[in-house]
Image (spheres, rainbow, N blue to C red):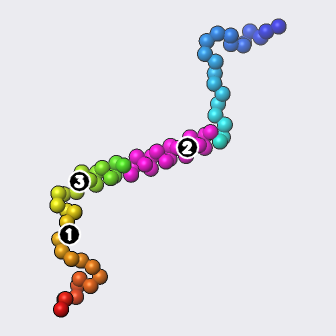
Amino acid sequence: MRSSFVVTTGLKLSRSPNAREQAARRRLAVIAAVTGLAAVSAALGVALTPHGAGEPAGRTGPFSYFPSE
């Protein structure tokens, strides 16, 4: 005899993800968050950098503090 609690019509429940699938989902979420943060910070850096700042003002280096002969 069939149980009256068995669902015969409508949507059936999908199985819940196992531990490996949950870990993969968490890993994907972390990678997406880090990539998104990097993209946003790069876009802000490009947007907020003043024009002409890419050209160095003068020669700098380890010996730029000493007068050149």
> At 21% across and 77% down in the image, what residue appears?
59
Q: Position of residue 25 (x, y in %)?
A: 56, 40
Mark before the other along the chain sequence, 2 or 3: 2
Q: Which residues are magenta?
A: 21-38
Q: Nearer the viewer, mark 3 or mark 1?
A: 1
Above or below: residue 8 compared with residue 57? above
- Which SS class for mark 1? loop
Give yes or no for residue 29 being in the magenta stretch: yes
Q: Are marks 2 and 1 in contact (CB under 8 Å)?
A: no
Q: Label the magenta part by its dominant secondary structure.
A: helix
Q: Which residue is mark 3?
A: 48
Cα–Cα gap, marks 3 and 1: 17 Å
Q: Which residue is mark 2?
A: 26
- Which SS class for mark 2? helix
Check disc 1 and give the amino acid type. Pro
The image quarter in which residue 50 lies: bottom left
Local crowd at mark 2 within 10 Å, few (<14), some, or many (≥20)?
few
Quarter of the figure with the N terminus: top right
> At 34% across and 48% down in the image, what residue appears?
40
Give yes or no for residue 40 being in the magenta stretch: no
Q: Position of residue 43 (x, y in %)?
A: 30, 49
Q: Which residue is mark 1?
A: 56
Furthest residue to the right?
1
Local crowd at mark 3 within 10 Å, few (<14), some, or many (≥20)?
few
47 or 58: nearer the viewer? 58
Q: Position of residue 31 (x, y in %)?
A: 49, 48
Above or below: residue 51 compared with residue 33? below
Q: Position of residue 45 (x, y in %)?
A: 28, 54
- Which SS class for mark 3? helix
